[in-house]
Image (cartoon, coloured by chain):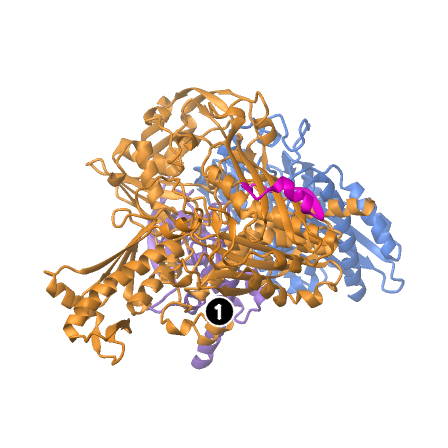
Chain colours: A blue, B purple, C orange
């Protein structure tokens, strides 16, 4: 089909990008790897008048881990670089694991971590060509007033499908956002609105410049389990990250995070399930219970890719498996 | 508005005047007549348009041509040198790894990126390395055999040279 | 290719001595692969002609609607637009692949009066580039009056349902029946009878190369079209019909084709529209389908709703089978009458079924068009029958492998009188082979928890004989010319669409002439050169084109023998043979080179080159009673799976296949087919489904339609059982389509073996397994 026409703006500094964003506002889109945006443009899901290329901006492609200040990942770091990074593999294997499950080797060579956290939501009715959509009135996400996934639904039920994000939220990652007015740091978890029409809180003029991951306490284990039909290419039907820290002495769980991806317009923290783990020595029966709690916490599930009832069951199974595995890793760490 | 960009493809420099919305695959195929790079989906799923950019496999349907400036692009046409097939090409030929041939250029380039990085891959490594290249004809079996055979051949060449 | 490899993989059978051949029976690399590995090979989308325009097609957004008005005036005004055409600009004639029976021809080049599915072609634009053509499409205004859509066979075939095609009552376009023996009486002889219902889904062929073509009219009003097709001949004829031209004034050239699997057999709308646009503009017009168009606007595999009743004796002997089948055909007919009838035939091909009744009907629905796909008409019924046989085996306590061996078709049998007579059949051996490979008899009962093994058997055509296309031409024609330098030119219209037939056919010619494979140059798939080949489908090419090639090569050889005999002053008892590029006296080895023989022929004939001709028209098998196919391939497959009881996910661990292809002309190529067919077949069993709601396809993309990647494929082991068929060239039969049949039932049977749940509708997705497991637990 070919991409729609746009003007390509290529600031060479981050400061150079701000006025462009200010000038073109919502008509402009930031682009880094472009592996998701260009597909959407091809389909005319988005048709920005300007693309602001971030890739010419130096010093945004780095992976730093100094002392005990945690991990800092420049937003322009490709997923491949992240996947292969020795320090990440060693200190944050869950990140390498989750990144390694994104799409395909080719996509990972191009896509960036900044792009992946800013991924737009998806659904069967929205991510289609304009020819395909011609036979349907626009949905909420396209500025219309209906949802096809949930008939009669009063908002957009598209899904947030980035593989890296559940893992990063599990690790308590933060984002550094920059704009002409200065910088701010927010928890990655807070970055997502849960609203399909407006996926994240990035303000006009703001750019994600860094992902920050705090160092983990000792005896922490983390795992990301992706459920998809194929071993590559696919977006997740469900992604579950579990990160668990235990007290080596008592064996009790000090901290637990369980994050569910691809079920809603934002990743979901299963906070009640987490609370069920904290402070106790985790036994198999507890894991079963906690998995059931997580299943209930998952909220309304929609029929995209797999039937609702099935997905709900898979939440339980994957949470159970992820918690078991994370615990095992914590115990052997 | 068109602008002139310089591309380096298969060790040759080209100047092309293009609109910014032109993807690398279109410029390769339409402007440079390098039609060995195939287009199977235009949505980053099939892998047919895989080329190497600075040695890394990328989907040329999802790369703006403008972003290839200053990079070394390798397409299937640039793989054989001085009338000599690359060991991967030899292996694909010998092992019967080619059927309809439409996935072949992208498949070979993904395999090259894999072997450049990991000269002695296991079968599992190979499967992962070509995971982003779909093939409807072969079931991948002979392709995997060919890549393993090429890996061995390259090792032997390396030993002789060394 | 090492000799070791050639030997290692192949099971040699029944005294077939490959040693006596020099070119066939060898795993030679394909003659087209160098062009493909270097990027040299040009596919239709790679072609560029000077002055070429780009075409785009406007499609219906409605599943069923009247077209009230089309206004193209705004589109025509766009700068760079050279032509806009609609149904009005066509002749308004209907065409279809079943030329013999006009009632089955139901397609217009562009819609006239109404549209019948989302994607139906309404208008087409030619412009200086794709972007401009796209822009113009948006400006075409079509006024529709929506009609009620019919999306399943029940509502479509209900009384009083709106008609999708005028005059087709109840939207049932085909009804076919087969009756063998006395089914009603036979039930009384059965010790055990069971009935089951099965369903299969819509899948798409998904060749990696989307459909593409370039059409070019010249000033003399003649048309040349380069197109990615499995049948240049069909494209030529159907274009002629739709454009009102003589077939001979249309030249179809097939560049390299990036896979077809059945969705490139017929003339499709891009071919018609590019030709019409070229005629209108006087310039070449290229149309390349997007992946989405490839999914919705070409062909899909026909889903079937099947009821099957089988009766057996206590010992497992099959007594009677009754099969009621409804095909959900989509908006147009395509090959549906064929699909309807062959589903009935192929269902019982692998087994002796003395009493058999089949009732099949094809129903129109407002969905994309279904048509033939690799394993045409066979995957659906064989999923049903092979699944049911396992159910039967369990109920009567007979091992599923033994049950199949007991009933397996044998050579010389008449399956269906005047329809299917079996000249060669290695099925029993194939079953034994895969059973040994999986070590079924030892391991079958003692697999670890969650593991299971299942079997499926199959039989398939080697070329369909029925002349539904109403052609005057032979099924294949070949010319072979030996040049004065000893090189050989072989002319054919047979289509290599990736399966490797060019190589196989050249091997046959080379063998017959005693030359090397590289001495033979093939000129294929240009309708202007040699006519007579229906195309690459029905697994016909090796057998039909192979027989013609062999005859043509033998013809030229005999002519060269004559001049050689004169030259050598041959004695009456001397016999000549062609080997190593020479024609020699068998007894003494004395002789002349092929080049010298060709020169001698030319000297004696005013310079005329020596040309041999061959045709294949299968009269013999027809007189023997087999009107559907000259011969049949057979095989069996076993699949081992691991089922995750918590998620319902199936991991296919290993697949063993044994295929009777008569003789393997090129074992490596056969192996490529055996292995490669698993890709389509496993997807069919487990992951592939074109998902639709009210005729709208949700997943017309390779992200959302799940064809398997390299990481998803199991281990394979493949065996070729050679049976030396009397009808095939050097004894060869098909080796491509039949292979896709056994996988779905073998997987279903393996899953049952693993966890005890029976899934009767494809694809076998994890949610179905989990649901069945829960229901089982609840019982």
Q: Where the N terminus of chain C falls, by quadrant?
A: bottom left
Query: What kind of element bears circle 1?
Result: loop
Query: Which residue does the image show at 45% across and 67% down from the upper left?
Result: B95
The residue under label 1 is: C14
Q: Could you tell whether C483 is left or right of A293 in the image? A: left
Q: Please say whether residue C276 is one of the residues in the magenta stretch.
A: no
Q: Position of residue A7 (x, y in %)?
A: 44, 39
**Residue at 47%, 60% in the rendered image:** C661
Q: Considering the image in quadrants, where does the C terminus of chain C appear?
A: top right
**Residue A159: percent from left, percent from top:** 65, 40
Residue C319, position as x, y percentages in the image: 64, 49
Q: Nearer the viewer, residue C163 or C694?
A: C163
The residue that appears at 25% across and 65% down in the rendered structure is: C557
Does the rendering let one see residue C210? yes
Quadrant hosting residue C113: top left
Of residues C573 and B73, which is closer to you in this image?
C573
In front here: B27 or C670?
A: C670
Question: Which chain does tag 1 point to?
Answer: C
Q: Residues within 10 Å of mark 1 (few under 14, many from 20)?
A: few
Please, is residue C768 above or below residue C404 in the view?
above
Which residue occupies the foreground of this view, C722 or C72?
C722
Residue C547 placement (x, y as % from top left): 35, 57
């Amino acid at each position: 089909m070919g991409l729609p026409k746009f003007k390509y703006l290529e600031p060479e500094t981050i400061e150079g990008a701000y006025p462009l964003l200010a000038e073109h506002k919502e008509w402009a889109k930031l682009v880094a790897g472009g592996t998701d945006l260009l597909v959407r443009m091809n389909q005319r899901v988005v048709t920005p008048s300007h693309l602001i290329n971030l890739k010419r901006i130096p010093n945004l492609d780095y992976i730093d881990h100094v002392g005990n200040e945690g991990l800092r990942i420049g937003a322009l770091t490709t997923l491949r670089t992240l996947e292969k990074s020795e320090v990440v593999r060693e200190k944050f294997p869950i990140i390498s694991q989750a990144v390694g499950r994104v799409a395909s080797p080719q996509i990972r060579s191009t896509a960036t971590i900044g792009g992946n956290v800013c991924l737009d939501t998806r659904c069967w009715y929205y991510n289609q060509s304009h020819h395909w959509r011609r036979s349907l009135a626009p949905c909420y996400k396209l500025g219309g007033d209906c949802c096809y996934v949930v008939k009669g639904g009063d908002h957009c039920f598209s899904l947030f499908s980035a593989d890296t994000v559940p893992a990063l939220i599990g690790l308590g990652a933060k984002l550094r956002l920059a704009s002409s007015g200065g910088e701010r740091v927010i928890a990655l978890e807070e970055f997502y609105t849960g609203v399909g029409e407006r996926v994240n809180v990035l303000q006009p003029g703001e750019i994600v410049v860094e992902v920050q991951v705090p160092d983990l306490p000792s005896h922490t284990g983390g795992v990301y389990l992706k459920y998809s039909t194929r071993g590559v290419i696919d977006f997740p039907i469900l992604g579950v990250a579990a990160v668990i820290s235990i007290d080596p002495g008592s064996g009790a769980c000090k901290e637990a995070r369980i994050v569910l991806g691809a079920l809603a317009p934002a990743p979901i923290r299963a906070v009640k399930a987490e609370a069920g783990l904290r402070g106790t020595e985790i036994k198999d029966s507890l894991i079963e219970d906690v998995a059931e709690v997580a299943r209930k916490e998952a909220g309304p599930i929609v029929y995209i890719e797999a039937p609702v009832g099935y997905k709900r069951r898979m939440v339980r199974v994957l949470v159970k498996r992820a918690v078991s595995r994370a615990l095992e890793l914590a115990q052997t760490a | 508005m068109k602008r002139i960009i310089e591309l380096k493809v298969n060790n040759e420099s080209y100047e092309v005047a293009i609109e910014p919305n032109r993807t690398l695959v279109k410029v390769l195929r339409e402007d440079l007549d390098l039609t060995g790079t195939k287009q199977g989906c235009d949505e980053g799923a099939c892998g047919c348009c895989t080329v190497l950019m600075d040695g890394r496999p990328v989907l040329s349907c999802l790369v703006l041509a403008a972003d290839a400036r200053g990079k070394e692009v390798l397409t299937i046409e640039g793989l054989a040198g001085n009338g000599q097939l690359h060991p991967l090409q030899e292996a694909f030929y010998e092992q019967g790894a080619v059927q309809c041939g439409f996935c072949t250029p992208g498949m070979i380039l993904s395999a090259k990126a894999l072997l450049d990085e990991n000269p002695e891959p296991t079968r599992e490594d190979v499967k992962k390395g070509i995971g982003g290249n779909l093939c409807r004809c072969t079931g991948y079996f002979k392709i995997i055999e060919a890549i393993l055979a090429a890996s061995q051949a390259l090792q032997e060449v390396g030993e002789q040279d060394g | 290719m090492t000799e070791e490899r050639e030997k290692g993989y192949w099971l040699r059978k029944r005294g077939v001595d490959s040693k006596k051949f020099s070119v066939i029976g060898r795993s030679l690399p394909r003659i087209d692969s160098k062009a493909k590995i270097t990027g040299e090979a040009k596919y239709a989308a790679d072609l560029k002609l000077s002055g070429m325009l780009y075409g785009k097609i406007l499609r219906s957004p409605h599943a069923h609607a009247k077209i009230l008005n089309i206004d193209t005036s705004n589109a025509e005004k766009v700068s760079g637009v050279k032509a806009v055409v609609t149904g009005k600009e066509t002749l308004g004639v209907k065409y279809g692949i079943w030329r013999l029976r006009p009632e089955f021809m139901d397609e217009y080049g562009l819609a006239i009066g109404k549209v019948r599915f989302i994607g139906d072609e309404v208008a087409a634009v030619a412009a200086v580039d794709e972007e401009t053509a796209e822009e113009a499409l948006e400006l075409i205004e079509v006024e529709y009056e929506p009609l009620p859509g019919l999306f399943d066979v029940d509502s479509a075939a209900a009384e009083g349902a709106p008609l999708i095609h005028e005059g087709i009552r109840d939207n049932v376009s085909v009804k076919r029946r087969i009756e063998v023996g006395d089914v009603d009486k036979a039930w009384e002889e059965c010790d055990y009878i069971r009935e089951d219902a099965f369903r299969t889904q819509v899948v798409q062929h998904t060749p990696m190369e989307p459909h593409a073509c370039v059409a070019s009219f010249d000033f003399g009003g003649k048309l040349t079209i380069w197109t990615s097709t499995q049948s240049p001949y069909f494209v030529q004829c159907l274009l002629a019909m739709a454009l009102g031209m003589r077939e001979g004034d249309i030249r179809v050239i097939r560049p390299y084709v990036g896979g077809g699997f059945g969705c490139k057999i017929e003339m499709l709308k891009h071919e018609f529209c590019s030709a019409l646009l070229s005629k209108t503009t006087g310039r070449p017009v290229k149309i390349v389908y997007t992946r989405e168009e490839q999914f919705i606007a070409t062909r899909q595999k026909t889903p079937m709703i099947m009821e099957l009743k089988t009766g057996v004796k206590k010992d497992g002997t099959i007594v009677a089978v009754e099969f009621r089948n409804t095909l959900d055909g989509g908006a147009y007919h395509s090959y549906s009458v064929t699909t309807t009838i062959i589903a009935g035939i192929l269902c019982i091909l692998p087994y002796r079924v003395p009493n058999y009744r089949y009732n099949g009907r094809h129903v129109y629905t407002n969905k994309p068009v279904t048509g033939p796909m690799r394993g045409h008409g066979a995957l659906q019924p064989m999923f049903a029958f092979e699944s049911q046989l396992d159910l039967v085996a369990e109920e009567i306590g007979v091992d599923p492998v033994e049950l199949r061996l007991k009933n397996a078709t044998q050579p010389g049998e008449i399956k269906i009188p005047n329809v299917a007579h079996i000249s060669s059949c290695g099925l029993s051996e194939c079953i034994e082979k895969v059973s040994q490979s999986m070590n079924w008899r030892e391991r079958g009962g003692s697999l670890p928890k969650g593991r299971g093994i299942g079997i499926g058997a199959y039989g398939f055509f080697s070329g369909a004989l029925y002349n539904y296309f109403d052609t005057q031409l032979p099924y294949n024609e070949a010319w072979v010319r030996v040049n004065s330098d000893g090189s050989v030119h072989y002319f054919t219209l047979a289509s290599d669409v990736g399966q490797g037939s060019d190589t196989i056919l050249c091997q046959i010619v080379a063998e017959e002439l005693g030359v090397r494979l590289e001495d033979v140059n093939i000129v294929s798939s240009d309708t202007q050169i040699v006519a007579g080949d229906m195309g690459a489908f029905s697994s016909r090419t090796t057998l039909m084109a192979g027989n013609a090639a062999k005859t043509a090569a033998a013809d030229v050889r005999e002519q060269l023998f004559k001049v050689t005999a004169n030259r050598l002053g041959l004695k009456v008892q001397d016999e000549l043979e062609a080997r190593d590029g020479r024609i020699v006296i068998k007894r003494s080895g004395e002789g002349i080179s092929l080049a010298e023989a060709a020169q001698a022929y030319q000297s004696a004939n005013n310079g005329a080159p020596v040309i041999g001709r061959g045709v294949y028209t299968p009269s013999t098998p027809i007189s023997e009673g087999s009107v559907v196919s000259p011969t049949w391939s057979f095989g069996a497959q076993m699949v081992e799976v691991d089922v995750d009881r918590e998620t319902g996910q199936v991991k296919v661990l290993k697949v063993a296949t044994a295929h009777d292809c008569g003789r393997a002309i090129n074992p490596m190529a056969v192996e490529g087919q055996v292995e490669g067919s698993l890709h389509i077949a496993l997807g069919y069993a487990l992951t592939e489904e074109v998902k639709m709601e009210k005729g709208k396809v949700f997943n017309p993309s390779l992200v959302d339609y799940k064809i398997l990647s390299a990481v998803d494929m199991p281990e394979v082991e493949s065996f070729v059982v050679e049976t030396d068929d009397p009808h095939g060239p050097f004894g060869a039969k098909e080796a491509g389509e039949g292979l896709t049949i056994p996988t779905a039932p073998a997987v279903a049977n393996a899953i049952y073996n693993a966890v005890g749940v029976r899934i009767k509708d494809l694809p076998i997705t994890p949610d179905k397994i989990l649901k069945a497991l829960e229901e089982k637990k609840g019982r």
